[in-house]
Structure formats: C-alpha cells, structure tokens
Image (cartoon, rainbow, N blue to C red):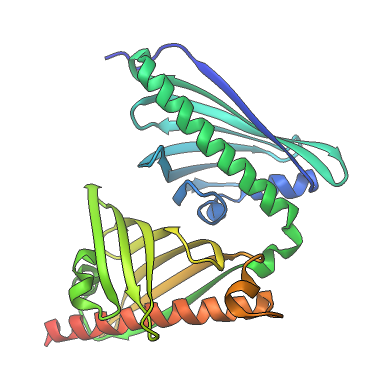
C-alpha cells in the first residue's frame, strides 16, 4: 500500500468584524476548541511551550469519530499558526496547513485556513471523502470563530466552567465501572429512560439518551465520550438544549484516604438569542447562567450520588 501520492491543497476564508489579535487568540487556545468548534470532541496536550505544542485531537468527520496527533507552531508576530498531523487516520495519509490572520483595519480582519493533504493510495474515493470532510469542518470552524470573535467582549460572560465533587468510601474501579457502563444507566439511573450506546472503537462511545425531568417531560441528548481508563471520561454533547451553543464535560476519579473523590466538570457556551424564549421576557445572560448551572449540577450530582450508593455497596 502506498501512503504517499498527489498533494492536494484547499483554502477557506472568512471576513471577521473583530481585531486580528482577538481572532488569533481564539485559534491559538486549543483547550477551548471543543466548546468553540462543532466537529471537535476533545483535545489533549501531549507537549507544550510558548512556540509549539503537540496535541491529540478527537473530532467528527463526515459523521465518523476520528482522532490524530498534530504538532502546531506559533508565530504571534505574523499572526500565523502552522499545523502538521504526525499520526493521521485513514483514509488520510498526511495532512497539514496553516491558520493565517490578516488585519484589514483596527476592527476587521481576514481569517484564512489552508490545508494540504494526501490520500492513501491516491484513491479517488478517498480524495473525495477528505475534500468533503475538510470543506464541512473548515466552514463550521471558520463560522464559529467569526461568531465568537465578533462577540469577544461577551465571551467571559457566555462561557463558563464549574465542578461538583462527591466523596465516596469506595474502590476507584467500581466507580469507574459505573460511569463507563453508560449502557446500563437505564437500569441504574431513575431519570434515564433510554440510552443507546455504540463503541465501534475501544474507548470512543457514541450515545443517545432520553432523560425525564420532575415535570414529566423527556429530553433527548446525543454525546460522544472518550474513555481514559482507569480514572477519567470526557465527553461532548453533539445535540444540546436550546440555551447553549456547546456543552462539554468530564468525570474524574482521584484516590484519597478512605476512598475516592469523584468530580463532574461542565463547560458551557450560552446562546443569547433564546434566553427569553426559554426563561421568559426580560431574562438575562446571568439568569441563563444560573438556570443552566443548576440544571446540569443537579443531574450530575444525582448521578454521582447513585454511583456512590452502587460502589459503596460493592465494597460492603
């Protein structure tokens, strides 16, 4: 099998009504990509310094979950970030490119996203698949950056993170089993009415879940989870409630004297255009933050308490 062939090039761009430095800052902060970019599920830093980083990325491409390792190099003076995949996922044989931000004036800029790629065996079907994935993901990422940059003054208010921690006199392995086996949640969690889970690749779970609330209504969410045994699971909701543009989270298990501390972390990006529709006339971003925080915290804390009951019973 040949892994090299014709190098294909693409260019996608968008005009942004925001200063170039703001746009560059959003592209540079990879830790927030799952909140900012629809296709991105999770990003892990493998190495990092002021001028370069190695990252492991999980993202959707044409509906499938793919993952790869990339190196990025930063040139803040030229407002440019170059990237190259070190380990690609078929049908991609190799891929790289650059983010380039060009100031138009003090308040507007042009963002360009360059890609070059090679397909395994140069197969036409593979080239077409990659082109389609690059077109779809690039358009989504550029539009997301444009929207975020043009609202950059509000980002500190719209994007927030919080934790809930429950101590358990239990074994870490039993707690991890409870959180990992989401396919059993309809039996273990009273508020979960239905859960469909597929795990085509070990450690990557795609799930759809129906949860019932106190008023009897049922909400459907879809998520992708990346499992880091034996002590961490991260996830991204790919279908989110109407008050959010994005929601990511993680479960972490830390062994302490006498048991474990288990933490649920939520990171949320709020919408502003639906607040009055869902919360009532005159309601504000602060009201939406409080509402979403309370709803997510209640659900995850209830799950943690049930996990505690399950795991402590196993310890006896």
Query: What quarter of the picture does the C terminus occupy?
Result: bottom left
- Tell me: 172 left or right of 61: left
Residue at x 35%, y 32% (from the top left corner) = 89
**206, 80: nearer the viewer:** 206
**252, 225: nearer the viewer:** 225
Where residue 225 appears, as percent x and y from the top left, is: 34, 57
Query: What quarter of the picture does the N terminus occupy?
Result: top left
Residue at x 20%, y 68% (from the top left corner) = 177
Where residue 109 appears, as percent x and y from the top left, is: 79, 40
Q: Is residue 8 above or below residue 145?
A: above
Residue at x 25%, y 78% (from the top left corner) = 189
Quarter where residue 72 is shown = top right
- Tell me: 241 left or right of 316: right
Quarter where residue 265 is shown = bottom left
Q: Is residue 211 above or below residue 67?
A: below
Where residue 300 appears, as percent x and y from the top left, is: 38, 77
Q: Is residue 181 above or below residue 14?
A: below
Where residue 68 appears, as percent x and y from the top left, is: 40, 38
Residue at x 58%, y 81% (from the top left corner) = 290
């Amino acid at each position: 099998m040949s892994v090299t062939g014709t190098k294909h090039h693409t260019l996608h761009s968008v005009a942004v009504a925001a200063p170039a430095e703001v746009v560059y800052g959003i592209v540079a902060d990879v830790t927030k990509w799952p909140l900012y970019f629809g296709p991105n599920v999770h990003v892990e830093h493998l190495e990092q310094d002021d001028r370069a980083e190695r990252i492991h990325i999980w993202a959707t491409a044409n509906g499938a979950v793919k993952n790869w390792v990339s190196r990025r190099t930063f040139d803040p003076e030229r407002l440019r970030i170059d990237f190259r995949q070190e380990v690609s996922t078929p049908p991609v044989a190799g891929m790289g490119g650059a983010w380039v931000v060009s100031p138009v004036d003090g308040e507007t800029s042009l963002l360009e996203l360059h890609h070059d790629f090679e397909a395994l065996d140069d197969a036409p079907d593979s080239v077409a698949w990659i082109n389609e994935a690059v077109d779809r993901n690039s358009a989504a990422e550029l539009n997301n950056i444009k929207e975020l940059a043009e609202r950059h003054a509000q980002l500190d208010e719209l994007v927030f993170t919080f934790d809930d921690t429950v101590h358990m006199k239990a074994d870490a392995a039993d707690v991890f089993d409870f959180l990992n086996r989401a396919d059993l949640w309809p039996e273990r969690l009273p508020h979960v009415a239905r859960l469909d889970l597929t795990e085509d690749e070990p450690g990557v779970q795609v799930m759809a879940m129906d949860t019932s609330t106190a008023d009897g209504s049922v909400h459907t969410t879809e998520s992708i989870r990346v499992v880091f045994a034996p002590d961490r699971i991260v996830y991204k909701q790919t279908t989110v409630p109407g008050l959010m543009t994005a929601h990511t989270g993680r479960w972490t298990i830390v062994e302490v004297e006498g048991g474990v501390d288990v933490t649920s972390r939520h990171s949320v990006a709020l919408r502003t255009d639906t607040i009055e529709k869902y919360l009532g006339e005159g309601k504000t971003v602060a009201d939406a933050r409080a509402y979403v925080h309370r709803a997510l915290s209640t659900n995850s804390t209830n799950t943690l308490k049930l996990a505690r009951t399950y795991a402590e019973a196993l310890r006896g």
